[in-house]
Amino acid sequence: MSRLTNDIDAINTAVAQNITALAASVLSMGGILVAMFLLDWRLALVSLVVVPITLWFTSFVARYTRTGFEQLQRHLGELNGVMEETLSGQKVISAFRRNETVVAAFRERNAEVYRAGIYANTYALLLMPLTTVLGNFFVIVIAAFGGFLALQGYVSVGLIAAFINYAQNFVNPVRQLANLYNTVQAALAGAERVFEIIDTAPEPEDAPDATAPDTIRGEVRFEHVDFSYNPGTPVIRDMSLEAEAGKTIALVGPTGAGKTTIINLLSRFYEVDGGVIAVDGTDIRDIRKDFLRRRLGIVLQDMFLFSTSVMDNIRYGRINASDEEVYRAAKIADADHFIRQLPQGYGTVLSERAGNLSQGQRQLLAIARAVIGDPNILILDEATSSVDTRTEVRIQKALLRLMQGRTSFVIAHRLSTIRDADCVLVIQGGQIVERGTHQELLDRRGVYYRLYISQFKGQEI
């Protein structure tokens, strides 16, 4: 956010406000040089001696100025990050009595911005007195050499006086250019940070021959899939699985086993390193991403809701949905009742991150958003892990209605929620170590059995 505000603003200042000043200074210097050469070429050539000296001083100071402005922009970004994090986490900070700590952190970052600003502007302000001294040196050179030529009878005293006047007028645009140079240095420091974002590799583009099938049944197949976020560190290894259309596949296993990565690969947020992921027998790399994602419905543990009306948040699943379709989706998700109790019903505007709703209510809205998209493939990532038992029952009923007739991938740590899954895949170390129904895996008394009894020890299996 700091790059999109502070750094862009520095670039805007350099471009919008200084272009006219730059053009005026250059034209003024050019006109003065032409007039000087027309009056006397010898004095004009001597006058140009000051130009390379000015350029050398400017480049010398610029090395330090550029470094200072780069540090200033970076520290300013860190300061903004501390402020945003502190304001967003104010409740946690107060609960753990960390107010003094965050104030100290702010002061530390603020001091870094102060020191970087002093460093950058100290060197930047050197250019003004330097150009003033060089301007006086310019006059001295012209007076001395002009006096010599006058003694030789080559020029008149009046011509020397005219050249001194031109010299003084020539120094003013040079001084303006020096000031502009400081602004340009700040803009270049900001531009480097902005271009770091622009140069970040985007998602892979669709293949030129990618298609959008007329229909999707929902059959999903992984064939010997390999994937790693960082080269040399595999996350998914030689994984093969098959989900028939309309079936429910549960993914269980310890944190970091690769369950969410499987969902990311299916959604094409990342591309596989090896193997094939196919939907209805077609490699997903041959299906347009916008079409594929339109056929996917995702309900996450912490679904993001926007600071707009409840109606618009549900409609986010399909922008052209009618009001009646939104109402119907909310009823299927068991959210219609609590929505109508809100101050403005479906028109109620949610606060930042939907802070005016409970966790369960946010999940029900997320389910309604998925319902209205009418997906063929449904992805549920820990959709009930953060709610109480009573709310979980309501969400489970809504999810069961949503899953009817759809291929569903369910990631769950609460194993009680996946007893009715058609197939349970136990993921460990990026590989499928067990697969089968809930009862089959319990009878096998392997990894799944140990996970299950760790949650329901003392209860009848």
Image (tube, rainbow, N blue to C red):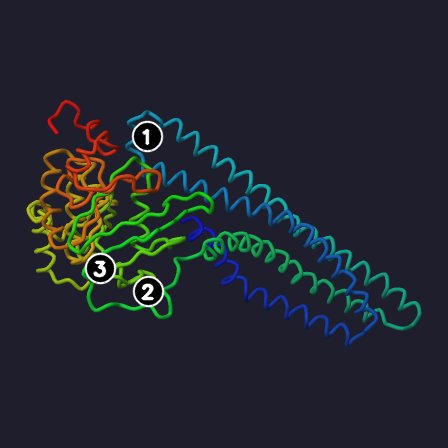
Give whichever of discs 2 and 3 has the lower sequence position.
2
Of the pair 218 and 168, the residue shown nearer to us:
218
Real-space Cα distance between discs 3 and 1? 41 Å
Task: Pick whichever of labels 2 and 1 is earlier in the sequence.
Answer: 1
Instruction: Compare residues 181 and 160 and report the one nearer the observer.
Output: 181
Res 301 seen here: no
Q: Residue at x 18, y 53 (%)?
A: 407
Residue 86 in picture, x, y percent from top left:
36, 36
Snapshot quadrant of residue 297: bottom left
Residue occupying image coordinates x 60% and y 42%: 119
Please identify the residue farthest to the front as the structure is shown: 444
Q: Amino acid at mark 1?
A: Ile
| Crowding at mark 1 (Cα within 10 Å: few <14, some 14-19, many 20+) | some
Point out residue 223 in the picture as x, y percentages from the top left corner. Answer: 32, 53
CB within 8 Å, label 2 to label 3: no
Secondary structure beneath disc 2?
helix
Residue indicated by mark 1: 93
Residue 62 visible, this angle:
yes
Q: Please, what is the three-letter code of the amino acid marked with disc 2?
A: Asp
106 to 219, vertically: above or below: above
Return the mark for residue 295.
Answer: 3
